[in-house]
Image: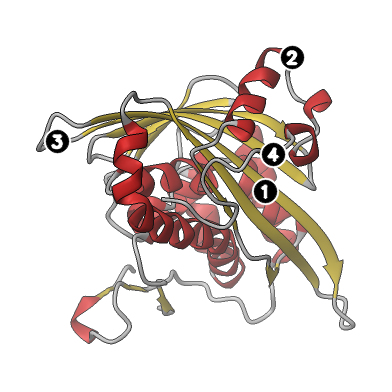
Amino acid sequence: MIGTYVCPPGRAGRRLGLAMGAVAVAIALVGPGSTARGGIGRRLDPAQVVPLDQLPAESRENVSEVIRDHTFHRQGEPESFPCSSGLYLSLVDEPMLTLALWKDLANSPVQLRRISADRFQGEDGAGTTATWDFLLRTPKLHVMLAYLNYSGPKSNARIDARVLLIVRTGYYKEVNKQPYIQHNVEVFVKVDTKGWKTLARTLRPVVERILADQVDEAGQFISLMSRLVVTYPNWAIDVASAQPSLDESTRGRFREIVAQDRRPNASPGRPVVMANAGNAGAETRRR
């Protein structure tokens, strides 16, 4: 049996695989270049943005600097979607799992490896590499700090930046007892490359638009993946079980969560991704 899902427009396949879009946002940013809601250079009190006392001591000043002296800032719109807390946290906390699910459906040059329990490194295949740390992982708040490097494959352009991604999450139930998630994504970017301020004057409108789009897509990506897992539980379990990058405890926990969320009308097949809903020839079928 084959199901159908239409991929949202934009760069979802390539941009959104890495750590809830932390690296994805940065990749999109440094390609052409942005400000967004919050503006360029607006100074904020870091302690009012994140609970610094809950972050590792060695990271607090770094996080404070990115917030206080950010080059770009974007506050995404809140998004609500049906999803259990267990499935949501599995997808947010395990970027290797989330990327594996996506790459099983769509060709993507994104590569990702786990360096330690809280550190990951990825590259997009187009000149951008990033290493990021989960500084805080709680059900209601995730804080990630990425160190990004872009080297233009067709030029001598090189950009180094730090990207702070903050995901705030709330949990509630509808009157029919169905669990829902509401989260929003906030991003601070500090470009460390010398001479960037001169370029920013020219590229500011372009970067603004790109960063806004990418933050919104990053927030939508988890809702997309959660719907696919719930609709196609057999597929999700098969993909997770075949990933050598996931330890057995992670695979086992994911199988339990998917089993708990299984619905009577769930499909035994796998999704079909359509790259362009208006182009029947763009449909990619996976059996």
Q: What amino acid type is highlighted by mark number 2?
A: Ala
**SS type, badge 4:** loop
Left or right placement of residue 32 versus residue 100 in this view: left
**94 or 209: which is nearer to us?**
209
Give the image quarter of residue 276: bottom left
- Asked whether residue 33 appears in the rendered view, the answer is no
Residue picked out by circle 1: 167
Q: Are marks 3 and 4 in contact (CB under 8 Å)?
A: no
Compare marks 3 and 1 and give the one earlier in the sequence.
Answer: 3
Residue 44: mark in rendering? 4
The residue that disc 3 covers is: 153
**Circle 2 is placed at which residue position?**
57
Label whose residue precedes the other's in the sequence (2 or 1):
2
State the image coordinates of residue 170 (x, y, percent, origin top left): 80, 58
Dot 4 crowding, Cα within 10 Å, few <14, some 14–19, many 20+: some
> In the rendered image of this protein, does residue 201 appear above or below residue 221?
above
* Tag in front: 4 or 1: 4
Q: Decide which of tag 4 and tag 1 comes sooner along the chain.
A: 4
At 70% from the left edge and 59% from the top edge, which residue is drawn?
Answer: 183
Residue at image position (34%, 33%) is 196
